[in-house]
Image (tube, rainbow, N blue to C red):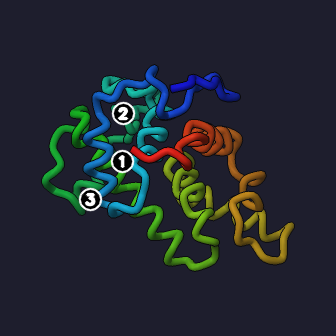
Amino acid sequence: MSSVVLAFGDRSVRDDRWTDKYDHLFRKYTKHYFGPHIDWHWFKAQAIVESSLKHKAKSNKGAIGLMQILPSTYDEIRDDLPYLADITQPRWNIAAGIFYDRKLYRRWKDKGEFQTQDLPALTFGSYNAGFGRMLRAISRAKRKHDNVARWEQVEPFAPKQTRDYVQRIHQLMADAKTIKR
């Protein structure tokens, strides 16, 4: 497999640089929470951006694990999924992160304002910045555009860190659209 270096220095999500140690968990929980039609590599790409696939990662804000989940967010997720165990265990961290992505995705889908192809960017943006911050970005975008229905219209109003976050996930997935595993 080629190892094209992307703008942020990351390699494709399919590059051999990235461990496949957790792939079975990304597959399992993507299928469980999103169904078989969603490419699980999106969530592996998210974990690469979050933690470089280091299961012991901890941010300076207290986010933990592969999916960099705050303990307070994990507690909220456990209200819906009480069987989740220790946040530091890769299995539960990945399951919680993908479940939370699904929850955010559904919130955007239920709003009915955005095109389907833009929902993943809004979902990842919300995972990074928070749903409320993304709503504020949309409000600012609506002051400039009559009809806001695309990520590209919202993106300039999202925090820079969030714009970079979503862009990195998309770049990691650049070759994944044509290759299935």
The numbered disc on residue 97 is 1
Name which of mark 2 and mark 3 comes first in the sequence: 3
**Does dot 1 land on a helix, a strand or a loop?**
helix
**Label 1, label 3: how many angstroms apart (C-alpha)?**
13 Å
Residue beneath disc 2: 66
Task: Determine crowd level at label 1: few under 14, some 14-19, many 20+ residues with C-alpha closer than 10 A.
Answer: many
Front position in the image: 142 or 72: 142
Q: Are marks 2 and 3 in contact (CB under 8 Å)?
A: no
The numbered disc on residue 32 is 3
Badge 3 amino acid: His
- In this rendering, would 120 be left or right of 56? right
- Residue 2, image x and y in percent? 56, 25
Name which of mark 1 and mark 3 comes first in the sequence: 3
- Residue 164, image x and y in percent? 66, 38
**Label 2, label 1: how many angstroms apart (C-alpha)?**
9 Å
- Residue 64, placed above or below residue 136: above
- In this rendering, would 99 be left or right of 101? left
Task: Determine crowd level at label 2: few under 14, some 14-19, many 20+ residues with C-alpha closer than 10 A.
Answer: many
- Residue 2, placed above or below residue 101: above
